[in-house]
Amino acid sequence: MHIMEGFLPIEHAVGWTIASAPFVAYGIHAIKKRIAENPEQRMLLGVAAAFTFVLSALKLPSVTGSCSHPTGTGLGSILFGPAAMAPIGLVVLLFQALLLAHGGITTLGANVFSMAIIGPFAAFALFRLAQKLRLSFALSVFIAASMADLLTYVTTSLQLAWAFPDPVSGFAGSFVKFAGIFAITQIPLAISEGLLTVVIMNAIRRFNPQELKAMKLVSRSEVNA
């Protein structure tokens, strides 16, 4: 992540684009509905989008044809749900491909699927699960953001292994190789992203607790704490 321009076989590039398209379409609908009902959340949505753009633009060289970086999708997933991150991720990845030569147009669908679909849905599910288990707000945010980052890279490793199976060990062997190389840089990045997201969410909780309460992210007792 981001898989670079032209790296995937054309059938894989087309397939991931088709797989991502329904999520992007529904995400646009979800954002329009959310903003129509809560116009005051426009600025917070912009913050989430900017957070994703800045973090995912910070890249470290990794395995051939790719790189490691934070994803920044956990914050928006927690605030607005995973559907909203698909179109946001598409715009972020498109601008990065065009302006920063980071990723590519042919691999846009694959990158959207891993970073803007799998990662956000994982973040949202884990955050809700942590809330049901009555974990602290900070720990819930950390788990959601860090695991969204890691699962994005697991998905990228699966995509690359599927496109380039090992001649001897096949898909499984290729996946282990890609995931193992990614893990060297991605595990510390995921931890760092989780901690940074906690800092941002705690700042929002401190200065705008009523909005988080309205979004059902914190309880009345947490607002008053």
Image (cartoon, rainbow, N blue to C red):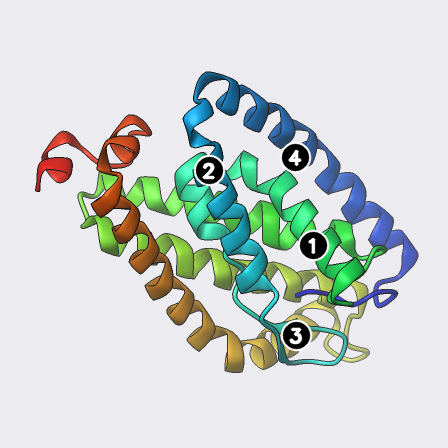
Kind of residue indicated by mark 2: Met
User: Disc 1 marks which residue?
Assistant: 93
Disc 2 crowd rating (10 Å Cα; few below 14, some 14-19, many 20+) is few
Nearer to us: label 1 or label 4: 1
Mark 2 or mark 3, earlier in chain: 2
Disc 3 crowd rating (10 Å Cα; few below 14, some 14-19, many 20+) is many
**Image disc number at residue 43:** 2
User: Disc 4 marks which residue?
Assistant: 23
Disc 4 crowd rating (10 Å Cα; few below 14, some 14-19, many 20+) is many
Kind of residue indicated by mark 1: Leu
Mark 1 or mark 2, earlier in chain: 2
**Image disc number at residue 202:** none
Instruction: Assign a secondary structure to mark 1.
Output: helix
Residue 210's x, y, as percent? 23, 31
Kind of residue indicated by mark 3: Cys
* Left or right for 51, reference 26: left
Residue at the extreme right: 10
User: Disc 3 marks which residue?
Assistant: 67
